[in-house]
Amino acid sequence: MPELPEVETVRRGLADRLQSFVIADVEVCRSRAIASPGGEAEFRDALRGAEVGTWSRRGKYLMAELLPGRGTWGVHLRMTGQFQWHPQPSEPCTHTRVRIWNEQDEELRFVDMRSFGEMWWIPEGQELDTVMTGLKQLGPEPFTESFTAPYLKRRLKGSTRSIKSALLDQSLVAGVGNIYADESLFAAGIRPHTPAGQLSLKQLEKLRTCLVEVLQASIGAGGTTFSDFRDLEGVNGNYGGQAWVYRRNGKPCRICGTILLRDKLSGRSTHWCPNCQS
C-alpha cells in the first residue's frame, strides 16, 4: 500500500498536472470505486464542469478543492490505486476504474488492480470526515508540532504491543506503513519487538526525529520502488535503493555487516538488524 511519501508524491504530481483543469466529462468504469452517498451518478454530476483547485493530503487520503464552490473530491489509493496522465486518447486497461477528461480531451485515469481504492464527493460546506469517515481516526501528521516525544510517551503509556505495531496504527501517527516503520526503527536503533510502553522519552525523541527524516528523504526521492507504486507519469520512486533494512533480509547490514532478519509482527513482515537494533 502506498504510504505517506508515495501519496505526497501523487499529490504534488496532481497539483502540477491539473492546474486550470476543467472537468468536461467523467466515466465510472467500476461502481464500487465511488464510496460517497449518491454513488457514481451523483459523483459524475458533481465533478462535471468543475475546475480542479488546490490538492491537499491527510495521512494517506487526498482531497481536491472543486471550483467555484463545487465541494471536494476525495481519494484513497488503498493497496494498488494509481493515477495515470494520458495527453492523447488511448484504450483503457482492464483495471481502469475512473476516467476524467478536460475540454482538450486530455485524460486523468484511475487504475486499480485490486479494486480497493475509493473516491468521494463531499458537498460544499459539509465536513469532510462526515463522508470520508476514515479521517476521524487519524492521529497527527508526522511533520506537525503536535507529533512530539511527550505525545508518544503519553499515548504509549502501559502499552504491551510492539513499537513496530504501534507505528502502523493510523490513530497514533497518520500515514506511516510497513516500509517507513522498519526504516525509522533501524535509524533510531530500536528493536521492533520492543513493547511500546517500555520506550524512554529519549528513545521516543530519537524515533520521532528518525521517522521525520526517513519520510522526508523518501518524499525527496519520489517515494519507493517497492510494490506497484507509480507516480502520475508512470515512474517508480527512487527511495527503494536507499533502504537500510526493508526487504533486505538475508543481506548484510550496511552499517555493521550482520545478516538482516525478517520476522512477522502482528501479521506484518518486519526487517531489522539484530546488532544495530538491540
Image (tube, helix red, strand yellow):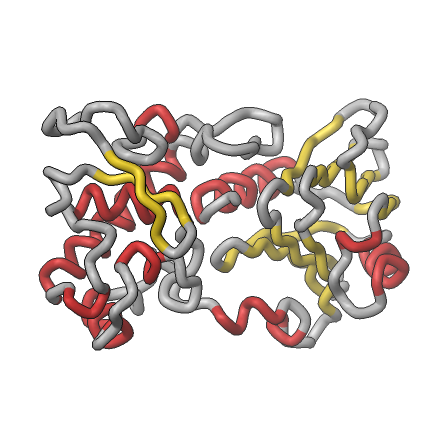
Task: Name the side, left or right, on which 77 lies relative to 34.
Answer: left
**Residue 229 rendering spot, x and y as whole percentages:** 54, 34
Q: Position of residue 224 (x, y in %)?
A: 43, 33
On the image, the x and y values in percent for residue 225 come to 46, 28
In the picture, residue 170 is in which quadrant? bottom left
Q: Relative to 155, is 208 above or below?
A: above
Residue closer to the observer: 180 or 252: 252
Asked whether residue 12 appears in the rendered view, the answer is: yes
Residue for point 24% across, 40% down: 272
Q: Residue at x 76, y 63 (%)?
A: 70
Q: What residue is rendered at 75% in x and 70% in y?
A: 123
Q: Where 238 falls versus 215 (above or below)?
A: above
Left or right relative to 135: residue 175: left
Tell me: residue 230, above or below residue 274.
Answer: above
Q: Position of residue 149 (x, y in %)?
A: 20, 65
Q: Is residue 226 left or right of residue 109?
A: left
Vertical placement of residue 192 versus 274, above or below: below
Left/right of residue 262 with respect to residue 38 in the rendered view: left
Q: Residue at x 61, y 26 (%)?
A: 234
Q: Which is more toward the observer, 118 or 48?
A: 118
